[in-house]
């Protein structure tokens, strides 16, 4: 009899992983890994742990990825994000995001960080607050990163937000035009 490792089989998670991750880990340990795990739950992002960036060789990456929010209030015809993550944006606490930045910084990685949110501007007030904190963090750490993200064209009307993006060293954005 042979033991499967999680790398010997393809596992698909339909939905968000947090509600099913403990079941996946238990199944790996019991050697009963299923090919598909499904969750319809949309978890609060307050308790998402800081990724273990220290376990990867950051020299092999051109970008590090962080996620601030899931969900989008916009109803674009071409987009299916609301099917996956819902219409109501859920955001991580800003102190959690700064802890994630600190964790990346501790690895020695310098370069680009992509905020992988499908619409970083989905919750404008919280996005502004985070970018303001990133700008402060960048000054304290001598600007080790350039940031990129995705946002709706609606952000173009928010000149305060655009100024904050510049101060925090956002070098590029992917824009969804509704």
Image (tube, rainbow, N blue to C red):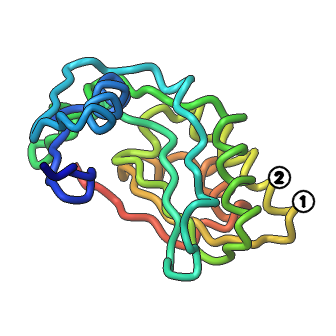
**Residue under label 1:** 140
Q: Image quadrant of residue 34?
A: top left
Q: Is residue 13 left or right of residue 57?
A: left
Residue at screen point 50% across, 81% down: 60
Task: Check the image and report above or below for 150 versus 32.
Answer: below
**Residue under label 2:** 136
What x and y, as percent, mark residue 161? 61, 48
Q: CA distance from mark 1 to mark 2?
A: 6 Å
Residue at screen point 15% across, 44% down: 12
SS for tag 1? Answer: helix
- Label 2: few (<14), some or many (≥20) within 10 Å? some
What x and y, as percent, mark residue 99? 71, 43
What x and y, as percent, mark residue 31? 22, 38
The answer to whether marks 1 and 2 mark residues whose Cβ atoms lie closer than 8 Å is yes
Q: Nearest the camera: 31 or 139?
A: 31
Q: Image quadrant of residue 141?
A: bottom right
SS for tag 2? Answer: helix
Residue at screen point 50% across, 65% down: 148
> Residue placed farthest to the front in the image?
1
Task: Check the image and report above or below for 178 versus 94.
Answer: below
> Does residue 98 appear anywhere in the picture?
yes
> Does residue 75 appear anywhere in the picture?
no
Q: Nearest the camera: 157 or 137?
A: 137
């Amino acid at each position: 009899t042979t033991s499967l490792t999680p790398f010997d089989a393809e596992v698909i998670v339909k939905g968000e992983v947090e509600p099913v991750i403990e079941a996946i880990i238990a199944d790996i340990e019991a050697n009963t890994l299923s090919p598909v795990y499904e969750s319809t739950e949309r978890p609060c992002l307050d308790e998402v742990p800081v990724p273990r960036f220290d376990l990867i060789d950051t020299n092999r990456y051109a970008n590090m990825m962080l996620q601030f929010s899931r969900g989008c209030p916009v109803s674009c015809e071409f987009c299916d994000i609301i099917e996956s993550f819902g219409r109501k944006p859920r955001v991580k606490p800003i102190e959690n995001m700064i802890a994630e930045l600190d964790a990346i910084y501790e690895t020695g990685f310098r370069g680009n960080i992509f905020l992988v949110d499908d619409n970083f501007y989905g919750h404008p007030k919280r996005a502004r607050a985070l970018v303001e904190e990133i700008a402060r963090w960048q000054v304290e750490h001598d600007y080790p990163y350039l940031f990129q993200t995705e946002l709706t064209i609606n952000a173009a009307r928010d000149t305060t937000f655009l100024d904050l993006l510049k101060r925090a060293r956002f070098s590029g954005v992917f824009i969804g035009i509704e």
